[in-house]
Image (cartoon, rainbow, N blue to C red):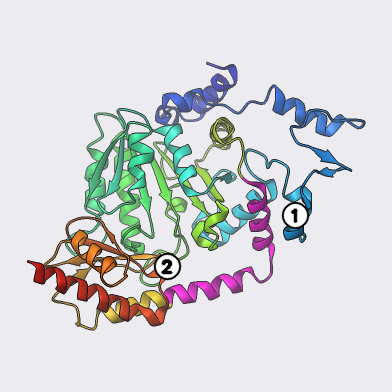
Amino acid sequence: MHKLATELNQIIQNENPHVFEMLSDLGKQMYFPTEGILSQSAEAKNKAFKFNATIGTAIEKGKPMHLKVIQDKLSAYNPSDLYPYAPPAGKPELRKEWRKKMLVDNPALEGQTFSNPIVTNALTHGLSITADLFAEKGDTLIIPDQNWENYDMVFNIRRGTTITTYPLYDENGLFNANGLREAILAQKGHGKAIVLLNFPNNPTGYTPNAQEGASIVQAILDGANAGVNVVAITDDAYFSLFFEDSLTESLFGALSNIHERVLAVKVDGATKEEYVWGFRVGFITFGNKSEALLKALEEKAIGIIRATISSGPHPSQTFLLDALKSPEFVTQRQEKFDIMKNRANKVKEVLDSSKFEDAWDYYPFNSGYFMCLKLKTTNAEQVRQVALEKYGVGTISLSDTDLRVAFSCIEEEDIEEMFHLIYDAVKDVEKQG
């Protein structure tokens, strides 16, 4: 094992042996190379006053070399903020601004100890880094039965973890905190559980309320008190899109410093929050009482970035940083939120009109991009195909009964017609027998 990895491991073990136990074998071996090319280039950047021949980029007349055909389209930006490599951890000023935004959006973080956000190549990359650090064969990922299918790719197929699910909703249509607690306590023999919380939930668009949120935190705390080391991941991909009767903060704040056996990991990004899906800018943040431990985990995460993509795209980080600093950012973001909320409200208005009650029920939703129909009489995949082929309406079948509808991409005035067409597809399938 590299001496830098050994040093980081020693820090983590000294600060919190439970967190050290959470690391995968790969996580234990990871480090950020502070020696060699990167460190020598950094030293030259500060001291090479004559010629700096260490950088793997091209320079022309003191500026990064670039093509006019590209720069003409991006003339509002300095070439230095576009073309050079971004640091592996991301632009320092962007990390600072995102941390400030986290504190504004999550008042529960005030007074908590958490790391500086590290820039990732959007959310999936952040989840992948987390899986590399903490997940491996023999571990269990705990997620609700309503979940994003890519979790299986990231944690099971890539890292060999077993996936355990519990029903998302209880008998009252609320978050099933008891199911989560039982799934965590079932890992007492192994001594470790990876819990992934995704609110607003994909695919149902559900976010727990404050009381449910407290129950989730208590379930994780009960597991920790029973001797289970819990890696508590909040996938906050759709954060801020909270429309009614729900938490308006990430549970990361409540989990960050809660117990020595709990490590909170926040994975979020601008992708959905700021409506910049193609920018591919996300963040990963760790929560723990020990600053030294957090720094060591940062080094390991940055080491994974260095070993995989080297660093994230520079232009999109620059664009996002400018947006976050703009005085118009908050107002424009609110305008888009209002559009999304109106679409969600329209969906509920249409579905609560009793016009479709013979065809489906719907799962509780109050946030995010999606909602799910629960079909009563027909197969979801058959309905999906008829809706698509005959009526030109695209939906996602998730099971025999569940059909996901993304209202995020449907204009408010078109929502009622869309559901009427899905209803027509249901009736066609019924006729087919």
SS type, badge 2: loop
Work out whether residue 229 can be spotted. no
Q: Nearer the viewer, residue 221 or 265?
A: 265
Residue 124 lies, in percent from the top left, at 46, 46
Q: Quadrant of residue 154?
A: top left
Q: Which label was assigned to residue 242?
A: 2
SS for tag 1?
A: helix
Q: Position of residue 335 (x, y in %)?
A: 54, 76
Amino acid under disc 2: Phe
Give the residue drawn at x 67%, y 46%: 91
Q: Is residue 361 visible?
A: yes
Nearer to us in this view, 329 or 255: 329
- Residue 69: which numbered mark, if any? 1
State whether residue 177 is above or below residue 84.
Answer: below
Q: Residue at x 30, y 81 (%)?
A: 349
Query: Where are the magenta residues, as a range?
Result: 313-341
Q: Nearer the viewer, residue 129 or 98?
A: 129
Which label's residue is closer to the chain start, 1 or 2? 1
* Mark 1 surroundings within 10 Å by alpha-carbon count, few (fewer than 14), some (14 through 19), many (20 or more): few
